[in-house]
Amino acid sequence: MKNFALYAFLFLSVLALSTRAQEADPNNGLKHIMTAEEAANSYKIALGFVETTPPEGVVRNVEEFGNNDGVIIRYPFGIPMSIIKELAKDAKVTTIVANSSQQTTVTGQYQSNGVNLANCSFLLAATDSYWTRDYGPWYVTYGNNQVGIVDFPYNRPRPNDDEIPKKVAISQGIPWFGMNVIHTGGNYMTNGIDQASSTQLVWEENPTQTAEQISQKAHDYLGINNYMVQQDPNGTYIDHIDCWGKFLAPNKVLIRKVPVTHPQYDEIEATAAFYASQLCSYGTLYKVYRVNTPNNEPYTNSFIMKDKVCVPIMGTSYDAAAILVYKAAMPGYQVIGFLGNPSTPWESTDALHCRTHEVADLGMLMISHTPLHDSLPAQACFKVNADITAFSGQAIYPDSVWTIYNVNGGNWDTLTMTNTNGVNWSACIPGQMEGSAISYFIHAEDASNRSSNHPYIGAPDAHKFYVKVSVPPNIVVSPDSLIFLTFEDMINGKIATVRNYTNQTIAIEQVNNSGTIPFAWEIENWNITLPYSLASGDTLNMKVKVIAPISGKTGFLCDTLYVNTATSNNNVSICVDPLLLSHSSAPESIGNIKVYPNPISDNATFSINVKTESLVRIEVYSMLGEMVSVPCNKILPKGNNTISWDASSFKGQKLAPGVYLYRISQGNNFHTGKITVLR
C-alpha cells in the first residue's frame, strides 16, 4: 500500500512537471517558422491530401469582420486569459484540448478567472501548436443557404494541426471541402464579398501550379474573383500578410507604416499605394488606413469578433496611437488593447491574429448590398436594394427590415423595406435637396432572434452618398417641411437649410394667407429675423422652434416660410399636431406602432399593438393640415392588429405624390408620424 502511494505520488509529480513544462513551451519546441527537422520533412506537406469537388452554386468566403459568433483557440494557450474572458462575454469560445483531463484543467482555469462558461465548448483533438489562424478552417456559404468549411494542405509538416479543419467540420455537422493549394491562414485575408489577398508565398509554396491556376482555385472554392497577390513588403522569414495588412471592411484596409529610415520603407509605402489604387467590391477605391509601427509592432495582427477589435499592444507610447487608428477606421466598435503573456509574448511576426480563428454563425442572417456612394443626381427617390438571407431557415420579419437614414447629420428616419422578389428587399429614400449628404444603413431581424445590419456596425459607420448640385445653379431648400410630432421636437427644434445658387439676393419671409397665425414659432438663431435677405452663393441654416401652446384645434396646423426670387420660389411648411400643444405635459404615446412600407406606391399597413380593447382612429392629413382620409375608426381587440390603407382619399381617389401626416388616437393617447406617397 505504501509502495502504491509512492508510485502514485511520483506519477502525479511527473505529470505535474510535464504539464508545467508543456505550458512553459506550449508548442513543444515548434516555432512559427519550420524547425530544421520540419524543413527536412517538408516534402511530406500535402502528401495524401484529397481534393474534393468545389462547393456548388454561388460561393462566398465568410470574412473575419462579418457573420461570426465564435472563436477557436487551443490549449496550452498562446493568448492571455484576459482575452478569452473578454471574448466569452458575448461570443462562443471553442477550446481545442488533447483529452478530457485537459478539458477539466481548462474548465477550472476558466472558472477561477471568471470566464463565462455558458459560452465555452471544447473540441477534443490532438494538436501540434497554438497557431489556429494558420491551420484553422475557412468558412464559406454556398448552394441553397448552406455553410461549409474549405480546407487546404497546411504549409507545415504538422499532421495533427492539419486535421483540425476536418474535425471542426465533423463537430459542427457541416460539409468539408478540400482545396489542393498549400496555404496558411496568416497569409490570407478576404473582404467577404469576392476579393482576397496574400503574399507571393502562396505562389512559392505551390510550384506545380501557375498563378492563374491558383486564382482559379480561389474562385472555385472561395468565390474570389480578384485575388490580389503582393510581394511581401516586410522582407521577413514568415511572409504572412497579417504582419503588415488587414481588411477591416469590404472597402477598408489597414497597412502598417514605418519611418523613412526603416529598411522596408519604400516597399511598405508601395504596398499602401497599391491598395489605395484598387477598386473594392463596391466599385469605389479602397480606404487605406495606416498604423505606425516604428519598431515593427504587431498592431495589424489583431482579431475582430462581432463589435470588438482586440489589438496586441506592447506597453509603449505607440500603443495609444494605434488604438486611435482602429477607432477612426472602425467607428462604433469596441477597440481593446491586450498585452501578451511574458511566456508567450507578441512578436512582430506572431501575435494575436495568429493564435485565434473566427467561427462562422451557421444560422447567420446575411445582408448583401452594394451601397449607394459618391454623388448621385437629384431624383424623386434613391432606391436601396438588398438580398437578405436567413441561414437559420427561420422567417424574416417583414416589419423589421428597414432602411434607416438621415440627411446632413439630422435625425434618423426609418423606411420599412418591401420584399420584391425572393430574397430581395427594397426601399426608396425620398429625394433631398442638391448638395445634401445622406447617410443610411440596413437592418433586418428574423424568427431565430438574430438581427443584422449593413454595414455590420450600423449607424456609427453608415453608408454615405451626396446629391449632386445641378447646373445652372438655383435655390435649394431642405427639408421642404418641418414636422413637429413630439415634445422633443418642440424643445430641440428642427433645422431648415436654404442655399442660394442664383446670381442675385433672395428673400425669405413668413406667409400666412389666412391672415391668422395658427401657432407661435420662432427662428432660434439670434441674428435671423424675417424677412431675411440671402446673398448669392450663401447658405442659411435656420433652427425653428414651436414656442406657444394652442388648444381647441383639430387636424394638423401648418404655417409657411416662403423663399422667393423673380425666377424661383420654394416653400417650407412648418406643421405641428395641436394635440401636443393642448397638453401641459407629454401625453402617453401609443407604443409598438409600425407603418410599412414607407414610402408607399399602392398600399400601406398600419400595425398596432392594442393593450386593451378600445376605439382606435387613424387620420391622414395633407401638408396643408387638411384631413384627407380616415383608414380606421373602430374598436380593435387587445393584441396585434393590422389595418390596410390604399393611399386614397375620402372620395376613393388616389392621393397625389407627396408627404402626408398621420395620427393614431386611442383614448387620450396618440401617435403621429409621416408617410410618403410615390406614384
Image: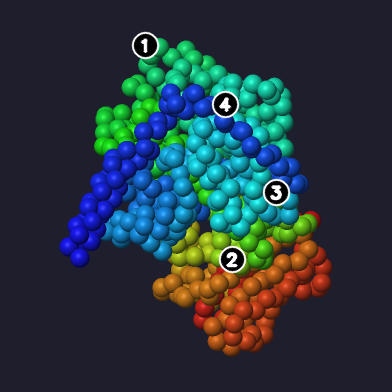
- Crowding near pointer 1: few (<14 within 10 Å), some, many (20+)? few
Given this view, does label 3 or label 1 mark the residue nearer the observer?
Answer: 3
3 or 2: tag closer to the N-terminus: 3
Q: Which residue is mark 4?
A: 43
- The amino acid on which the numbered mark 3 sits, given as a three-letter code, is Tyr
The residue that mark 2 highlights is 448
Q: In this orientation, does residue 27 appear?
A: yes
Task: Write the residue at 37% across / 16% down.
Answer: 259
Mark 3 or 1, nearer chain start: 3
Earlier sequence position, callout 1 versus callout 2: 1
| CA distance separating discs 3 and 2 | 20 Å
In the depicted view, which residue is nearer to us: 667 or 189?
Answer: 189
Q: CA distance from mark 2 to mark 4?
A: 48 Å
Please determine whether, in this image, residue 263 is positioned above or below residue 580: above
Other-residue count near label 3 (Cα within 10 Å), few / some / many at <14 / 14–19 / ≥20: many
4 vs 3, front mark: 4
Report x, y in % for residue 275: 57, 24
For label 1, the residue is 261
Q: Position of residue 522 (x, y in %)?
A: 46, 54
- Residue appearing at x 55%, y 51% in the figure: 168
Q: Amino acid at mark 1?
A: Thr
Q: Nearer the viewer, residue 150 or 19?
A: 19
Select label 2 or label 4 by which is in front.
4
Q: Position of residue 145 (x, y in %)?
A: 69, 55
Residue type at mark 2 is Ser
